[in-house]
């Protein structure tokens, strides 16, 4: 049967289909190391067609940002800090195990992805060795300062992970011990990086709890932040501890049925006041990264932005009604990801794919250590 759907109908269907968010990327465009200095990365500037006529993307360097924003604009940044969430250990029977902590659900009790995990039933024990202690695993003793143990409490159906109860000395938390036992986890597509751990943290990282960096913020330097302040481009902070909800792939064909995993957010009262004052004075709210977007919009689900501390499972895709955010700084995201869908909600899916194709043609670097986009409500 001949397809009589109009182009608009086809686009609408693709907006809701995970296949509509696919694109091809050569492996050499996946950034393995960050730009040095941080603000020497490239910046592709585009406008959102929702408030004006579409204009062609403009090619800049990230340190141009103070001249691209307006005095009175407000940058909202995610001040989460990546924890050393990857642990290597072994079963009490000797088999090697890799653990990625996701989130603390009770004191020293963490939801984690365990690899290989099929054989890890309730009651199984994992022993972790302190980094650099060769051979200490021969002594399986939880009382040893060089060893850390965890017990599997149950399987988590939503993530396929395990709930692990860690045996931590009284008066301490697991987070305090992770510097000794854990490693900062880089995404799986970063395979040959020479980056130091601090290069995978924003310069304003403060609140520990994320398992991945809010990567749009990696481009800022202290000097650039000061130049922005000098131009009366102000800064406010939210916290979203990046977890499985951010990087979990969309595995359903109909994106409207995708269920986001909850992530912890805090939007403090002083940030809410800064946003209200900025909007009242005619300034724009520019979110730094998709996680800042989810924090702000998640705190405004009642209809108005309010101070909020708790969890959000907000999933943003085309058709979303924006409540807080006017513009966005973001990196280039993986195909078929919820992050690509969020950015599409701001500028349109097909237009975003066209912009990605231009970025590919110009050799932009993609993903966590890659280059950035600036999306503004109107053309520069």
Image: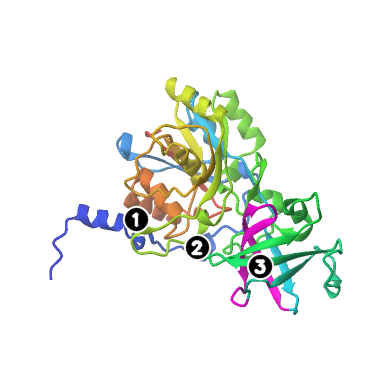
Magenta span: predominant SS is strand
Name the residue at the top extreme: 281
Q: Is residue 27 above or below residue 305?
A: below
Residue numbers of the magenta segment: 95-119
The crowd level at tag 2 (other Cα within 10 Å; few <14, some 14-19, many 20+) is few
**Residue 155 locus on image (x, y percent):** 57, 67
Of marks 2 and 3, which one's residue comes earlier in the chain? 3
Question: How far is disc 1 from disc 3 in space, using C-alphas?
Answer: 34 Å
Q: Which residue is mark 3?
A: 152
**Residue 56 locus on image (x, y percent):** 36, 42
Q: Is residue 301 above or below residue 123?
A: above
Of marks 1 and 3, which one's residue comes earlier in the chain? 3
Q: Which mark is residue 296?
A: none
Q: Which residue is mark 2?
A: 158
**Residue 250 locus on image (x, y percent):** 43, 61
The crowd level at tag 3 (other Cα within 10 Å; few <14, some 14-19, many 20+) is many
Write the residue at 49% across / 55% down.
261
Label 3, secondary structure: give it: strand
Q: Nearer the viewer, mark 2 or mark 3?
A: 3
Q: Is residue 326 above or below residue 250?
A: above
Q: Nearer the viewer, mark 1 or mark 3?
A: 3
Q: Are marks 1 and 3 in contact (CB under 8 Å)?
A: no
Label 2, secondary structure: give it: loop
Q: Nearer the viewer, residue 54 or 239?
A: 239
Quadrant occupied by the C terminus: top left
């Amino acid at each position: 049967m001949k397809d009589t759907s109009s182009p608009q109908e086809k686009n609408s269907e693709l907006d809701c289909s995970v296949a509509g968010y696919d694109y091809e990327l050569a492996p050499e465009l996946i950034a393995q190391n960050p730009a040095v200095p941080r603000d020497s990365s490239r910046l592709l500037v585009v406008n959102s067609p929702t408030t004006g006529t579409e204009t062609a993307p403009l090619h800049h360097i990230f340190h141009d940002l103070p001249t691209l924003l307006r005095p009175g604009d407000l940058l909202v940044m995610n001040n989460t800090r990546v924890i050393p969430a990857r642990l290597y250990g072994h079963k009490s029977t000797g088999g090697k195990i890799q653990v990625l902590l996701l989130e603390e659900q009770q004191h020293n009790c963490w939801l984690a992805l365990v690899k290989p995990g099929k054989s890890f039933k309730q009651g199984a024990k994992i022993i972790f060795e302190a980094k650099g202690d060769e051979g200490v695993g021969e002594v399986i003793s939880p009382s040893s300062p060089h060893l850390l143990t965890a017990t599997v409490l149950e399987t988590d159906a939503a993530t396929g992970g395990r709930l692990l109860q860690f045996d931590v000395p009284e008066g301490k938390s697991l987070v305090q011990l992770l510097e000794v036992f854990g490693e900062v986890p880089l995404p799986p597509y970063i395979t040959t990086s020479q980056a130091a751990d601090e290069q995978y943290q924003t310069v304003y990282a403060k609140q520990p709890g994320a398992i991945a960096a809010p990567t749009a913020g990696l481009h800022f330097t202290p000097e650039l932040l000061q130049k922005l302040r000098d131009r009366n481009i102000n800064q406010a902070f939210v916290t979203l501890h990046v977890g499985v909800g951010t990087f979990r792939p969309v595995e359903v064909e109909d994106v409207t049925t995708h269920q986001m995993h909850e992530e912890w957010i805090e939007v403090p009262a002083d940030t809410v006041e800064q946003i209200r004052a900025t909007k009242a004075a005619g300034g724009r709210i520019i979110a730094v990264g998709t996680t800042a977007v989810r924090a702000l919009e998640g705190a405004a689900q009642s209809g108005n932005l309010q101070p909020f501390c708790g969890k959000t499972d907000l999933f943003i895709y085309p058709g979303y009604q924006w409540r807080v955010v006017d513009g966005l700084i973001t990196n280039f995201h993986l195909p078929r990801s919820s992050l690509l869908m969020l950015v599409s909600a701001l500028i349109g899916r097909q237009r975003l794919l066209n912009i990605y194709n231009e970025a590919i043609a110009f050799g932009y670097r993609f993903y966590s250590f890659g280059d950035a986009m600036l999306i503004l409500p109107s053309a520069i």
